[in-house]
Image: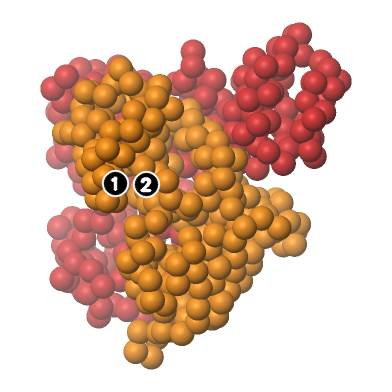
Amino acid sequence: MSKTVISVRNLTKRFGNFTAVNNISFDVYRGEIFGFLGANGAGKTTAMRMLCGLSYPTSGSGTVAGFDITREGEMIKRHIGYMSQRFSLYNDLTVGENIKLFAAIYGLSKQNTGKRTDELLDRLNFSSERNTLVGSLPLGWKQKLAFAIATVHRPEVVFLDEPTSGVDPITRRQFWEMIYEAAEGGTTIFVTTHYMDEAEYCSRVSIMVDGEVRALDTPARLQQQFAAESMNEVFRTLARDAERGE
Amino acid sequence: MDVIEVSGLSKSFGKVKALDSVSFSVKRGELFGLIGPDGAGKTTLFRLLTTLLNPGTGTASIDGLDIIKDYLKIRSRVGYMPGRFSLYPDLTVEENLIFFASLFGVKVEDSYDLVAPIYKQIEPFRTRQAGKLSGGMKQKLALSCALIHHPSVLFLDEPTTGIDAVSRGELWDMLQKLKEKGITILVSTPYMDEASLCDRIALCNEGRILGIDSPQGIVEKFNLKLYAIRADNMFTLLEAARQVEGVAECYPFGQTHHLIADEKFDIHRFTEQLEALSNLTIKPTKPAIEDVFIKLMKQ
């Protein structure tokens, strides 16, 4: 079995009397594309915040990229990549400036930043666009750049939040192609999404309902297990009986 | 005459051509879907047809009424649910409904038969402020308010964006029921998998319509040979497949990659050439709306 990049055991988060995340346990391995699904209000966001070092669990334990989620939130933040819905770059900065900004935020030295910028631009075939304003790039390029920037500090794991929501089918495919490439290169990808068509691209998928992980397997095996034709059907079967709304 | 008739409709904002000579028509009682990504012009089209924007060029009519000349008459006949929640967050559920009824000069009871199946689901929360409802409930309230004056045409701009799969399913069920009551519905969505729930769809991209047909008719137009392929290493597979003679195109498609074969393609040669890949499978597959969309985008 390959290396574990995320590992959580009995992770629980309570707010007063409300148990947002109830005793969840799972592992994510190096180079996996792991889909993290759940209905609105299922506890997905709370769980995500703990995995990203933004909030500490009430009980339970775990590690992300080698750091303890009960104590080392700050270290986790520095060692993961994050890309929110679509792109979160500055449209009025150039390609080079955006890379420089995020490299600085992640604490890369000046020397390293220069080297890493060249490397990323080279890998994206973007060297000629270094001084182009990000706002004027086509959507597909922006997305590639946003992902590259989320990996500027070479994180072991990158969190993606509904990465292809609302984009056209061609751009969406360019995006997944890039994700597949990164995953085969050893980067672990953690995708949270509402959209089952995004889940279909993941190597394994977990589904949260009412604070618990109710299913976790490859899309194909989940479909088999629930005698469903698509992930959408699997999800609806599981989430139909959810007691919690948002 | 069809309920919605659109002919050569264009709209620009500065240099941006949001809508570029769009033409289509929607029959009475039809559930018609505008399917396309952000920037396709869906919202602009809705705003034009609901008379909230003036078109640049072209014409359109609702129930035979011109969107420029007869805009006031149109407003009392259409229900519009914008993409962003636009009810009053500090009014209660019930107050919002009464408010919208009074705007249209009707009583809530007048169209209760139409609204009730949807409103009943949120009625237990009728004294709650609308801003404090969950996403799914907000939407049910918005839909109730859009129906309160018994419109002949309902416009829904991306009603399923940002809500989970269960609420999405419920919404489409509600639309089916409204359609059975004779209401004409124009709905937009960026999600291709929702296309099959419409009677007819228009595939939209960058201000233009790429094709109009029934969902079935759209996929039948895809006349290329299509296979679904898989292997343990999906990226390696993608790159390797593209090198094989007879492979016109290969792109990721959910759990598989879709491979478009030309006349030189030979399935035995393909599996032979890629035999180094573990767990390689290839089988013919049927095109989905997205395959057609990609094909049309490339033309």
For disc 2, the marked residue is A153
Mark 2 belongs to chain = A
Residue A73 percent across, percent down from the top left? 36, 69
- In the drawing, what numbered circle is on residue A108? 1
Front-lying residue, B224 or B10: B224
Location of residue A22 in the rendering, given as x and y in whole percent from the top left corner? 50, 81
- Contact between marks 1 and 2 (CB within 8 A): the answer is yes
- Establish if A67 lies above or below B38: below
Q: Identify by letter the chain in orange.
A: A
Q: How many marks?
A: 2
Label 1 – label 2 distance at C-alpha = 7 Å
Does residue A22 appear to the left or right of B265 in the view shown? left
Q: Chain of mark 1?
A: A
Q: Residue A28 falls in which quadrant of the image?
A: bottom right
Q: Pinpoint residue B73: horizontal percent, then vertical percent.
A: 18, 40
Give me the residue at 75% from left, 62% from top: A225
What kind of colouring is applied to the model shown?
Answer: by chain
